[in-house]
Image (cartoon, rainbow, N blue to C red):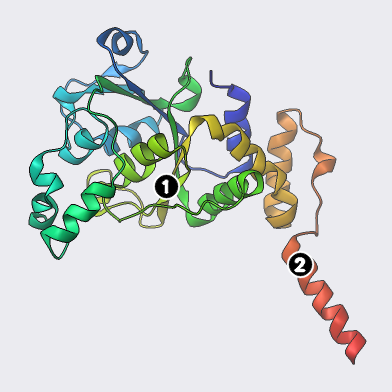
Amino acid sequence: MVNKADVEKAYAVLDLDRQIVGIKIVKSKSEFEQAQAKELTYPLAYCVAVKHAMKGIAVKMTRKLSGCGGSTRALGLIPPTESFYNGQDGCDLGLYQSPKLAASVARQMKYCPPDTYGVIIKPLEQFDTDPDVVLMVGDSYQIMRVIQGYSYIYGMQPNFNMLGNQAICVECTSYPLRTNQINVSLFCSGTRFLAKWRHTEVAVGIPFEKFEKVIEGVRLTVNAVEMNERKQVIQAKLAKLGYDGSEIRFNHTYYLKLEQDKQKQRKEVD
């Protein structure tokens, strides 16, 4: 179950403009119907639905109104076709130099099994049950902080997976879901056109079971990496959540300390 305190903490330590979104893949009609979200009445691309959720609008979709072939396939609403697996589709789109290369990419993609009934897409704090994946969109600094939080807890993620294609549906959803690994996406041209993301924005997908620890990792690295201006903002936001503000150390980061040490060494040499 989603811990609302974890979501509030995430907003406190990350200066996000958009809401954090949870994604749930459901396998049955009954589970889909029980989900508290607005069912689409017109075709909509999955990535656009994600952007709607980042504005606070909870939606759910089935294959019937999934408005993008790539995401419909990636989320398991339909099985991939032979022309996808043999590379013809990717080559026809002009995304790869040969069917052989496109086929190689297709075989490596991590898609959801083709038994999905529907997809629930809504702000994370609105989930009463565990979603599968958590999505965040921000600028490169904000997503860097998410990765630093992950690294603090889990260490290196050696398997980042990106193509610049199928960004929200594969790179941020099906890949984290299938591998249980965090993943970063620079978006794809399709979602930048359809959802109108800012040029400076990038995205991250996190398996839900790792979200709590990743956000705690972000909090626990504030002293090491954030400058005073950001620390003041974070300190005030965390104080409202009951955290001890004295934990924040001002005029201290790892890189300032390294510079101070270098200056000290220079003086000793002189």
The label number, if any, that marks residue 194 in the structure image: none
| Position above or below: 203 against 59 | below
Rendered residue at 22%/28% (across/down): 114
Question: SS at mark 1?
Answer: strand
Q: Which residue is mark 1?
A: 203
The label number, if any, that marks residue 256 in the structure image: 2
Rendered residue at 45%/52% (across/down): 159
Residue toward you, 188 or 16: 188
The quadrant of the image that shows the C terminus is bottom right
Q: Position of residue 229 (x, y in %)?
A: 70, 54
Relative side of 217 to 208, left or right: right
Q: Position of residue 264 (x, y in %)?
A: 87, 79
Rendered residue at 80%/66% (across/down): 257
> Badge 1: few (under 14), some or many (20 or more) residues near its Cα, within 10 Å?
many
Asked whether residue 265 is in view, the answer is yes
| Position above or below: 115 against 236 | above
| Position above or below: 6 against 103 | above
Relative side of 128 to 13, left or right: left
Q: Position of residue 182 (x, y in %)?
A: 48, 43
Relative side of 65 to 263, left or right: left
Rendered residue at 83%/74% (across/down): 261
Question: SS at mark 2?
Answer: helix
Asked whether residue 95 is in view, the answer is no
Residue toward you, 40 or 153: 153
| CA gap, disc 2 and disc 1 | 29 Å
Q: Position of residue 4 (x, y in %)?
A: 58, 22
Callout 1, which amino acid? Ala
Residue toward you, 222 or 160: 160
Which one is earlier in the sequence, the residue at label 2 or at label 1?
Answer: 1
> For residue 260, which quarter of the picture?
bottom right
> For residue 269, which quarter of the picture?
bottom right
